[in-house]
Image (tube, coloured by chain):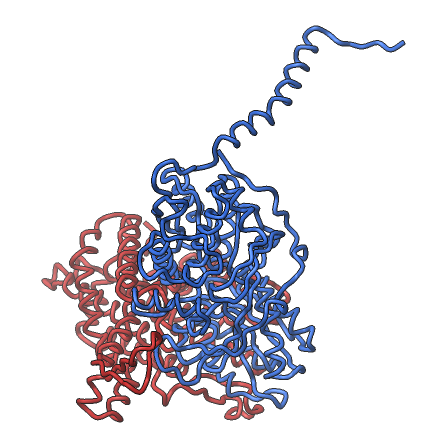
Amino acid sequence: MSKTNLTRRGMLKTSAVAGSGLALPTIFTAQSAAAFTNEPTGSSVTLGFNVPQTGPYADEGADELRAYELAVEHLNGGGDGGMMNTFSSKALQGNGILGKKVEYVTGDTQTKSDAARASARSMIEKDGAVMITGGSSSGVAVAVQALCQEAGVIFMAGLTHSNDTTGKDKKANGFRHFFNSYMSGAALAPILGDNYGKDRRAYHLTADYNWGYTTEEAVRTSTEAMGWETVAAVKTPLTQTDFSSYIAPVLQSGADVLVLNHYGGNMVNSLTNAVQFGLRDKQVNGKNFEIIVPLYSRLMAKGAGANVKGIFGSTNWHWSLQDEGSKAFVQSFGTKYGFPPSQAAHTCYVQALLYADAVERAGSFNPCAVAEALEDFEFDGMGNGKTLYRAEDHQCFKDVLVVKGKENPTSEFDLLEIVEVTPTSQVTYDASIFGGELGSCNPGA
Amino acid sequence: MEAIILQILNGLDKGSAYALIALGLTLIFGTLGVVNFAHGALFMIGAFCAVTLSRILTLSYTVVDETQKDFLGNPLKVDVPYLHDMFGQATGDVIIDWAVPLSIIFAIPVMIAIGVVMERGLIKHFYKRPHADQILVTFGLAIVLQEVIKYFYGANPIPTPAPAAFTGSFDFGAMLGFDPNLIIYPYWRIIYFAFAAVVIGAVFAFLQFTTFGMVVRAGMADRETVQLLGINIDKRFTLMFGLAAAVAGLAGVMYTPINSPNYHMGMDFLVLSFVVVVVGGMGSLPGAVLAGFVLGVLESFASMGAVLEVLPGLNQIIIYLVAIIILLTRPRGLMGRKGVMEE
C-alpha cells in the first residue's frame, strides 16, 4: 500500500500553481485578441524610419530618408505615385494605409547597434510607431530586428547584406528586401569565370566583422567551386584607413586576383590603395591582375573616383535599369531631389510600399496579419523583376545585378554599368543552410 | 626580403603622417602646456583645404548639350570650369590636375589663421586649468569641427587625386636588383615621405637657427625668465600654435591622394599620434619624430601575413603593446625630459 504525503498546505500550493498555469495562456490570448502594439486608433498611422543620420553612413541614411519621404508622399496620394503605378499589387489607393494618413518619425542609428535600438525603442514607445524600417548596416539590422520582435512590431530592414539577417538571426517579425552575401557570390562567380578564367589565385582582404565574414565565405565558396584557389584571407580592422601594409603582401603572394570584402569607407580606401600600388597594371602567372569588390554602392563608388573603372561587383539595384518600375521610381525621385536614387534609397522605398500593401491586403495593422500577408507574397513592378518574399526566412528572392565600374562615365552618377542581370533561380538557396529559427510572430501588447 | 623592404617603405610612409601630427602636438604641448585633442581635426581641415581649393578651381558654369541626355531623359547639363575660359582648356585642366600641390600654398595661411583664432579664442582661457579640462574642451572642439565639415561636405569620402604625373608607381625592386614588379611603391607615397622630411627639417631649422626659434626654445625651457627679460613670449607661443596647425594641415593636404578625405579622418590619427607623443617623450620634438617612424614601421610589420599567422590580431595592438613596453622600461618615453608632466 502506497502512502501519500499530501498536506493541506501542499495541496493549496499545488492548486495555486496549477491554476495560474492554466490561466496564463488565457490571459495572453485575451490580450492579444484585443490589441497589438501601437494599434492605430485615430485617423493616422505612424511609421518609424530608423536611418543613420550621423556617422560614416550619414549620406546613405540621408538618401534612405529621402526615399521614405517620397514613399509617404505617394502613399498619401501626393506626387506622381512612383512605383505604386507599376507595382503588380493594386491594393494601395493613394489614400494612406487602410484609409489612415501616413505620418512618420525618424531616428538616428548612428550605425551603432545600441544607438539604433535606443532610437527604435523611442519611436515605438514614445511615438507609437507601428512599423520600424531602415538602416545601413547588418549589425544594426540584426539588433533592431530582435528589438522589434520583442516589442511586437514589424521590422522592414533597409540596406543589410549579411547572410545572418535572414539566416541565423532571422525573426518572425523581420523582413528583408535587400539581397545578401550568398547571392552576391552566386551571381558574381560565373561572370568572373567568363571574364578572368577558371584558373585563378585569389587573395581576400576582409573587414573584421560579421558582414565581412559572410561575404568572404560566399565569394570563396562560389569561386572555389569553379576552380579558383584562395591563396590567403586576411582580416582587416574595421577602423583601418591606410591599407598599404595589407596590400603590399599581395604583391608577393602569387595571387592574381584581390577580393576586397569591404564596404563604405573601408572599400574606398582599400580600393584606392590597391590601385595606387599598381596592382591593376601588374601581370601575375601570365595573367592581368584583377580586383573585385563583391558589394558595390554608387555612393561608395563616387568616393573611390576613377579607381572603380573596370572593377566587377554586385548590387541590389541600379538607377539605369530600364524596367517600368525602376523608370517610374527614378523619375519620381529625380524630379523631387535632382539626382538619381541609390540602391539604399530603392530598397527602403520598396520596403515602405510593401509594408503598406501587406497591411491593405491583410486589412489590419496587426503584425501577425501583416507577416502572413508578406509571407510567400509574389510581386513585380518594383525594379527587380518578379520577386518572392520567402516564408521560411522572410528573404526576398529576385534578380541580382552584376556591375562594373564604368570606363567613361558621363556624369557623377554614371559610375557603374550593368554587366548582367543574374536570374533569381541562380541565387536561390535552401532556407536551412544558414541555420537560425524564425520563431513565431509577436503582436506585442 | 622583398616583403620586408616593402613594409619598411610602408612604415616610413605611415610614420611620416604620425611624425608630422605628433610634431605639432609636441610643439603645442612644449610651448603652451596644452594637451590639444583638436589636433587631429586640424589634420582633417588641412585635407579639406585641398578639397576646397579643388572645388574652387573647378567652379563651373552650365551649358546644355542637346546631343546628350541626363538620367531623366532631359538634355544633359555639362559643367564647364571657368578656368577653361580664362586659360584655355589644356592649361585649365593642368591647373585643376595640380590642385593638391597648389593647396599647400592655400593651406598655409588658412591653417595658421585657424590655429591663431583657436588659440586666442578658446585655448588661452584654459592655460591655467587642469589637463583634464584642456582635453575635454579640445576634444569637444574637435567634434564641433568635424560636424561643421560634415555639414558642408557630407559624410562620404571625397576623391582628391594626385596630379596625373604622380599617379603611377615606382619599381624599387628593379632599382635594387630584385626581380621587376616585386617591390612597387606609389610615387605619391614617396613624395609624401620626402615632403614630411622637408617639413620636419624646416621646423627644426626654424627653431634651431632663427632668433624667433631661439626665443621660443628659451620660453619652452623657462617661460618666466624669458618674460622677465621683457619678451612677449605669449605672442610667440600663439604663433607657434599657428605653426603647429599649419604642419598638421600640410600633413592633411598631402595625405588626400593617399586616402580620400572624410570628416572623420582626424580622429583616426589622433589617438595614435598621442601614443606617438607619449612614446617619444612628452615635450620632445626629436622624440615625437623618432617614435612616429618607429611605430609606423612596427605597425606595418605587424600587418604582414606571416606575422598574423603566428600572432593573429597583433596588427591591432602592436602600437599599444610597444607603448606599454617602452613606458615600463623608460617611463619618460624614448627621449623625454625630466620634469615634464611629472609634478
* Residue sticking out furthest to the top: A8
In depth, the one of B267 and A329 nearer the eye is A329
Picture quadrant where residue A399 is located: bottom right
Residue at 40% over, 54% down: A51
In depth, the one of B37 and A436 nearer the eye is A436
Q: Colour of chain B?
A: red
Relative horizontal placement of residue B301, taking residue B235 as reference (left or right): right
* Residue sticking out furthest to the right: A1
Relative horizontal placement of residue A209, taking residue B200 as reference (left or right): right
Could you say where residue B340 lies in the image, as x and y percent from the top left?
32, 56
Could you say where residue B103 lies in the image, as x and y percent from the top left?
25, 78
In depth, the one of A431 and A298 nearer the eye is A431
Picture quadrant where residue A290 is located: bottom right
**Is A100 rendered above or below residue A140?**
above
Could you say where residue A129 lies in the image, as x and y percent from the top left?
40, 42
In depth, the one of A292 and B149 nearer the eye is A292
Residue at 39% over, 67% down: A328
Q: Colour of chain A?
A: blue
Residue at 22% over, 75% down: B108
